[in-house]
Image (tube, helix red, strand yellow):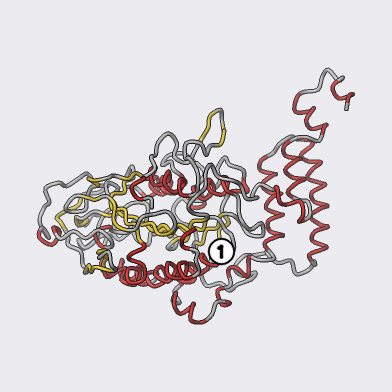
Amino acid sequence: MKHLFEHPLLSRRELLNRCGMGMGAIMAGGLLQPAEGLAQGPLHPKASHFPGRIKRVIHLFMNGGPSQVDTFDPKPALSKWNGKKIPNHLPTERPTGAAMESPFKFNNYGQSGLPVSDLFAKTARSAADDLCVIRSMQANVPNHEPSLMLMNCGDSQFNRPSMGSWVAYGLGTENQNLPAFVVLCSGLPTKGTSNWRASFLPGSYQATHINMKGKKPGDELIPYLQNKTLKPDKQRRQLDFLRKINERHLEARGSDPALEARLQTFELAYRMQLEASDALDISKEPQYIREMYGNTPQAREILAARRLVERGVRFVQVWHGAGQPWDSHSNIASGHKKLAESCDQAIGALLYDLKQRGLLDETLVIWGGEFGRTPTVELPMSGTGITTPNGRDHNHHGFTMWLAGGGVKPGTYGATDEFGFKAVENNVHVHDLHATILHLLGFDHTKLTYRYAGRDFRLTDIHGHVVRDILA
């Protein structure tokens, strides 16, 4: 290669390209080699900063904002003040009125006596003593779009990599035949794929979105996954030929992240033919397991989530549908009841199932939305469609999420005021939650970084503290 260095007009990029050492060429060559060369691909298993308490995450995302005072944070004062103006009314997105008592009854469950409303009675009966209920969550603003971005990506204003993408980037995957990050969501929610994109991280860390609603396993679930005209050996030859063409393309243009991501997608799709359809085919579960989870669309997604994590998928996010189904500005009694009925049994079954399989100790299950709801009633307003004051507005000042699984201490943590409006004890910001999740996975959140546009980025930006009091 001496002649290359003797050429005075070569730029650094041209030199790397002629040497065949451009990063794009290296990655493309490694990724699209036959199976024995895949071990060092971008999703190969990686070591964390220190031994983690968990290996994988299931995020049950209750899109739209479930009400904390109607689920896991009982407030008897609301009955006393029902219909009256409460003294510590805080600013809300829209004008709200008097206190509104919960239409749901709370009961104590488990040896811990955890209070949970009728909405999640089955979850509570199954796993009350496994839940770490954080009642003092806080976000930045009471709007869906920025709060969705904050909860999923760590920044409410700018496009940033999602939490699942950061986890895939940090740990890779335990199964090279499946994506590291899978999103089960019927349709697209507010902000669409921005909720689970890789942003400036390499494209291989972006989620694979699967819509299971009304679809059968196989090609219907993941279109074009199976090649019905070519056998695997011929597909392999086709991919190898494509690799050679793309290597020439990369050599002429230098590193191209978009092309690299596309090449990685080709290879992953080839490998997914072996396991993806099987992993998502819940009909292969024994009947008693399917009955334990239930037969709602949400139940089928939650069962599929268990099948994915037990096969090595690192991060699975299960959305409660597209839009904002938990966004009960009116008719919260019927709205929340219907929503909970579609997932309560399955959530309880998931926790029980993971535990009986020995998976709960190394899996973290997260439940919650992007914010909570006001303890006050939302007032009818023109243009909102609200005609009767029987719902609740958005509330970011204090809301509830729970964790269950490896490394977390069961019980309750933090508190809101007597009405459930604002966190007043052991406040936990979304950044703190993210820092804690990464800690459980074995990462110092300040050191899991990626350099982009001249600075080091991280999921928690310049914020976040590990909530050590909830660690077991």
Element under label 1?
A: helix
Q: Is residue 74 left or right of residue 133?
A: left
The residue drawn where x is 10% and y is 56% is: 84
Q: Which amino acid type is shown beneath numbered disc 1?
A: Leu
Q: Quadrant of residue 404?
A: bottom left
Q: Is residue 79 left or right of residue 401?
A: left
Q: Quadrant of residue 278?
A: bottom right
Q: Position of residue 208 (x, y in %)?
A: 58, 56
Outermost top residue: 8
Q: Position of residue 289 (x, y in %)?
A: 49, 77
Q: Position of residue 70 (x, y in %)?
A: 25, 62
Outermost bottom residue: 287
Q: Quadrant of the N terminus?
A: top right
The residue drawn where x is 63% and y is 65% is: 276
Disc 1 crowd rating (10 Å Cα; few below 14, some 14-19, many 20+) is: many
Q: Position of residue 368 (x, y in %)?
A: 37, 57
**Does the rendering let one see residue 80?**
yes
Residue at numbered disc 1? 308
Q: Of residues 41 and 368, which is closer to you in this image?
A: 41
Image vertical order of residue 461 relative to residue 187, above or below: above
Q: Of residues 252 and 127, which is closer to you in this image?
A: 127
